Image: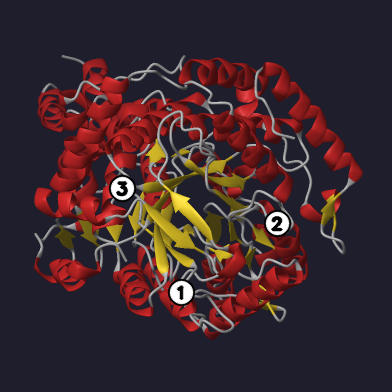
Amino acid sequence: MSLDELCQLVSTGKTDESTALVEKLIGEGIDALEIISTLTDAMGEVGERFSRLEIFLPEMMLAGDAMAAAVDTCRSKLLEGEAPKTKGKVILGTVKGDLHEIGKNIVKLMLEANGFEVKDIGYDVDSLVFIKAAQEMDADFIAASSLMTTTLPHQKEIIDLLKGQSLRDKFKVVVGGAPTTQEWADEIGADLYCYDAGSAPKQMAALLNG
Amino acid sequence: MTTAYRLWEIQERSNTGPLMDENDFLPKLFTPKLQEITKKYEIESDLSNPVPVDDDMADRIWKAGWELFREVGLYNTDTHRIIQVSDDEIKEALYMHRGQYWVGAGKDAVLWKHRQVEDTEPPFCIFSGDATCDESMHFSQCLAYLKEPLLDGFCAPILEDSMGQKIRSASPFEINGCTQHIYNLRQAAKQTGRPGTFFVAVGTAEHDSGQIAVSNNEWGVRTTDTRIIGTLTEFKTADTLLNRVVHCAQYGCYSGNLTGPIYGGWCGGSEGVAVALVAYSLNGLCIYGSIFNQHFPFHLNWGSNTTRELLWPISMAGQAMARNSKLLYTSNGFANAGPMTEMLFYETACHALVSTVTGWDLWEMASTRNKYRNRATPLEARIAAEVGHAVARQGMKREQANEIANKLLAKYEDQAATAPMGSQYQECYDVEKAIPTTEHLDMFYKVKDEIADMGVAFLY
């Protein structure tokens, strides 16, 4: 049994087998951080396949669950002071008044698959709650989704509240969702507009590192 | 309301139905059940044929959709309970649906009737761009759509601003926007001489408060009009939506259930979308008491439904419902390309042709993936309605529809991901007169001639 086989198990959503194999590999002396790094690459490929709809959301979700379980097992084996690297910490939610969440959930999957740490605060989320959650997490990003034109103003409200609290420079604000556009992101002063979930990880990593 | 006799028994199930964590509903109940049922009924797609001729599979899809709805139900996100309906209640509701309803008022009233596969009666045509527009363009766009001859019903563009102020859902600004929306609509209908036109209104209201505020038989949304009540994707509802169900029933207007199952999402592929469309229709009938269902299945990446991954389930679900019920259901087109592009006309014609021949009524046409302000015009809806009337009147069979659909797909399907955005309303319409520009009309007639050469016998 090898790391390649572990990647295969995770990619096909086999949670129990994946965690069992992680235990075995660590027992054989494989470094937990190396396992996490390898799995992150494998999940990136799963995410690419999902972006092309070679697999669908349920398969992607299963792979994500298997990945999360495998990483949790690795984390429990890490020595004190060791920590897997994340590409960035993200507070993610759908804005107030908006009950849609499927797009937001796919963004979460894609970000986690690509090594981001994501805290999903759900849908119909008050703008202040986004900010408080970001402060608690010490997040790099506030990512706000909206599916309706009449809830778009809440994306702007988040930015206005950040400015009002002198916190605007502390977080990168990312907006997305069906009615959002680059023009809207520019108009409200967002740091990034993501057209779709598939492009989010690369764009957000570039923004943080740029 | 088709199931008003059960209104409170069904509403009560939001409080008494099985309890479930919302995070478990889709991955642990909906998708596994859909996969199991799709396999059980041996539903397999062949995307090379966007209009299959397979009555047996259509009937299996009907049974599968019924079973899915009965087994999964509708999840209320506010109470975390599942509203479930029994087989007997589904049968009762199907019997109680009349199969035809008079909608609209006075001389503009229209009888909306159930259609069959390959029906020679034209589809009921609801015109709608589904798009938002500038406040200054709203009245002109209402006029422009209401000038369309084949319009049976109209859903006006959506306002983002009212009196120069941004409309925010559930706020006073939304109520104000809804008031402006319906006044523009009523005035436009009166000035175009169609005051009793059947409205689907008001699209500006995302929240129940906005909808309820404009119910008024003198100046607002009348009891001869309809509201649209959404189902959250997939198979979820909320109290703000159920509030509309109760309001429509007690106010006495019609309602339609709006659904958008996603290809690539929790439904999986084309087979799952087809089954979900049937199940959603039963949900609209039994739980929302709607007289019609308004479906816009769409592609996860593109947000459109004019490619074969979506045409197949549209076609099969239409046949399933046409053969096994007397329900009313509109096929809501979502195109990739924008206005005044040949691609948009091809996409729209294909969507309308496939839908009409397989038993649907039409709701056309959202362009540019329903994403951009001012990017929808009545002219693409016109080509849809003209195609719909033509293929019905000529008695087009599924085999020929399949052949023409493949020819139309060849015109655009390789550009689905890179479709042109086209023009804005004010760039291809004379805003004051609310009529298309010469350039726009020339393109319309050029594409119409090409489609006629493929075998569509336009009536004029």
In the image shown, does B389 or B289 lie closer to the viewer? B389
Q: Amino acid at mark 1?
A: Thr
Subunit of label 1: B
Q: Which residue is mark 1?
A: B223
Subunit of label 2: B
Q: Nearer the viewer, mark 3 or mark 2?
A: 2
Tell me where residue A205 appears, x and y as whole percent. 52, 43
Residue B428 in the image: above or below residue B407: below
Q: Nearer the viewer, mark 3 or mark 1?
A: 1
Q: Residue at x 16, y 30 (%)?
A: B36
Tell me if A138 is positioned left or right of B10 in this view: right
Tell me if B236 is positioned left or right of B342 in this view: left
User: Circle 1 sits in a helix, a strand or a loop, which is it?
Assistant: loop
Instruction: Report how many numbered discs are placed on residues in the image.
Output: 3
Tell me where residue B209 appears, x and y as whole percent. 44, 80
Tell me where residue B271 appears, x and y as whole percent. 32, 28
Q: Amino acid at mark 3?
A: Tyr
Q: CA distance from mark 3 to mark 1?
A: 24 Å
Q: Quadrant of the C terminus of chain B?
A: top right
Residue A11 in the image: above or below residue B247: above
Q: Residue at x 18, y 67 (%)?
A: B6
User: Circle 2 sits in a helix, a strand or a loop, which is it?
Assistant: helix
Q: Quadrant of residue B304?
A: top right
Q: Which residue is mark 3?
A: B280
Q: Earlier in the sequence, mark 3 or mark 2?
A: 2
Residue B162 in the image: above or below residue A37: below
Tell me where residue B273 appears, x and y as whole percent. 35, 35
Q: Which residue is mark 2?
A: B145
Subunit of label 3: B
Q: CA distance from mark 2 to mark 1?
A: 22 Å
Asked whether the viewer can see residue B297, the reply is: yes
Q: CA distance from mark 3 to mark 2?
A: 29 Å
